[in-house]
Structures are given as structure tokens and as C-alpha cells.
Amino acid sequence: MKRGGFGGPLQGLNCLKKAGETACPTTRSCERAVSPARLLLFLAVSLTAWGQTTPGAIEGTALTTEGKPVPRANLYYARSSRVKGKATGSVLPPVLSAKAGLDGRFTLSNLPAGSWTVCAEAAGFLNPCHWSTSPTFTVSAGQTVAKAEVRMDQAFLLQIHVSDPQGLLAKESSNAINIGVHAASGAFQRASLTSRDVKSRDYTVAIPLHGAAKVFVSGGAFQLNDNSGAQVSKGGKLTQVTAPETGKAGVAGPAGLGYTVIGLGKP
């Protein structure tokens, strides 16, 4: 006999028993009534599958280390990679983004169950994923992680001045000289070129307002001397720096480091 309707656990759901009948009428679209036990089993399996696939969410606030909101922070979040059930410092693609409100609050929705790392950036602050412990939260299916906190240390903008009396950098890109900071995580934060003219360039890079950082400088195809007249090696130079006691968060102070281009590097 040709079978009609849906197969599997849905088979027979369109079969309705009339009053006084003890079995489903034999028709091409209806084979048999569904027993209560089978219906309950189907519902239990369906609810379990639904619970496993229902996304969760993270609701929280971007805060300073003193607990004050960081308005309009840019958030970047991704699944944390795991080794033997433990979250690691790396993440899995894709990396998603969101923006906190003026009160620092944010909601990250439609998150599959698992461990999520949330990073944040804002003017005058350091990204915690680079400078401290990466904020990581465990999301359960269909649940919301409430009152999550992403804390950000205040930053000082260190100025670095490069003098170029011969104008050798005039036609070079901003990356002709490699300048940046090695963050606590090991990530390299490249300095931003803030101004330039024929005979000089100025860069800024964020460092902790309270704490030390290591600035790396390499002349690449050019020879550099530091302020003391010492030549920067071809492999570059690391210099430990700290923000001045009078430094303010997010405000650039006087040039903290200086270098001079003295010629082309040796091949």
C-alpha cells in the first residue's frame, strides 16, 4: 500500500479519531493514531534539540578600572578556542563587533553556546585583551549572561619624534620606520603617524597611564640614531618607558622619545 503523509516521528499526526472509533480510519493520508507515549517522546526530543541550538546573549558594561562607565566603547567578540575544555588566549573566526551606549552598556545577542572573549577599545583606554586578562564569558543555550563587566585601563599617548634633516623620508610611506609597543599579551601595537613635513615626523602610541611599556623602533631601510647619539641597530631597539607623573589619560604629553634619520641603511 502506498504510504501517505509524513514519515518518521511526524507520521500520523494528521490522523484524528472520531468519537466512538477505536482506530484510525484507513485512508491514503492517514495510517494510524499516534500513541500518547510516542507523542511525548517526540516532544521531548524536539525540546531538547531546540534547547541545544537556541542562542544565548551577553549583557554588560564597559568600565574603567575604577568602575566608571566607558561611553561608546567599540566591542570585538569571538568564540574562544579551547584546549581540553579550557579557554585559551586565542579566538576562532569570525570576529564580530558592536558598540556600547553612552552609559557603557552593551548587549551581544544570538551567541551559540560556548566560551566567548570580549575585547574593547576606546579613546584614552587600553584594550584589555592586549594589556591585561582577556574578558571571557561562558554562554549557555537560551540563557543570558547578565551584568558582565569589561574593564579597561587608562592610557597615556606617548609621543615619538623623528627628525629627518636630509628629507630622506619625504616620499616614503608612514610605515617606512617601524615604531610601536609590545603589549603585555605579546601583541605589537603600531604607533600612529600624527603629523609629518619635509624634515620630520611625529607618532603617538598608547601606553599604560600607570605602568611601564616597551617601545620598539626599527629604521628599516634607514639608519637611525636615538637622542643620545647611539645608533639603532638594524634589528631595532627596545626602550622601556613610563608615563610622566603629570600625564593625563588620553592626552599626549611632550615627546617622550626622539630619533634622527642619518642616512640609508646598509644592505
Image: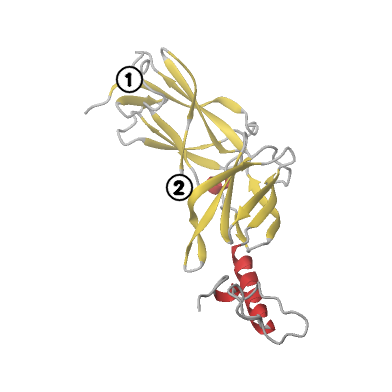
Residue at the farthest right position? 19
| Chain-order first, disc 2 or disc 1 | 2
Q: Could you tell me the amino acid type at mark 1? A: Ile
Q: Position of residue 227 (x, y in %)?
A: 42, 25
Q: Give the x, y percent position of residue 21.
A: 73, 85
Front one among 248 and 106: 106
**259, above or below 217, in the image:** above
Left or right: 190 as drawn, with respect to 142: left
Residue at 68% in and 41% down: 100
Q: Vertical placement of 209 versus 172: above or below?
A: below
**Quadrant of the frame with the C terminus:** top left
Q: How far across and how far down the image is residue 175, in percent?
A: 39, 28
Q: State the SS at label 1.
A: strand
The residue to which callout 2 is attached is 186
Q: Between residues 188 and 44, which one lies in front from this camera angle?
A: 44
Q: Is the residue marked by circle 1 packed among few (<14), some (14-19), or many (20+) residues within 10 Å?
A: some
Q: Which amino acid type is shown beneath numbered disc 2?
A: Gly
* Colouring chosen for the image of the structure: secondary structure
Tag of residue 81: none
Question: Is 191 displayed left or right of 12 in the figure?
Answer: left
Image marks 2 and 1: residues in contact by CB distance under 8 Å:
no
Q: Nearer the viewer, mark 2 or mark 1?
A: 2
Identity of the residue drawn at 78% across and 81% down: 19
Circle 2 sits in a helix, a strand or a loop, which is it?
A: loop
Residue to which mark 1 is pinned? 262
Quarter residue 36 falls in:
bottom right
List x then y, in percent, for residue 4.
55, 72
**Label 2 neighbour load within 10 Å: few <14, some 14-19, many 20+:** few
Figure check: 57 above or below 101: below
In the orientation shown, which residue stands out farthest toward the left? 267
Question: CA–CA distance between discs 2 and 1?
Answer: 30 Å
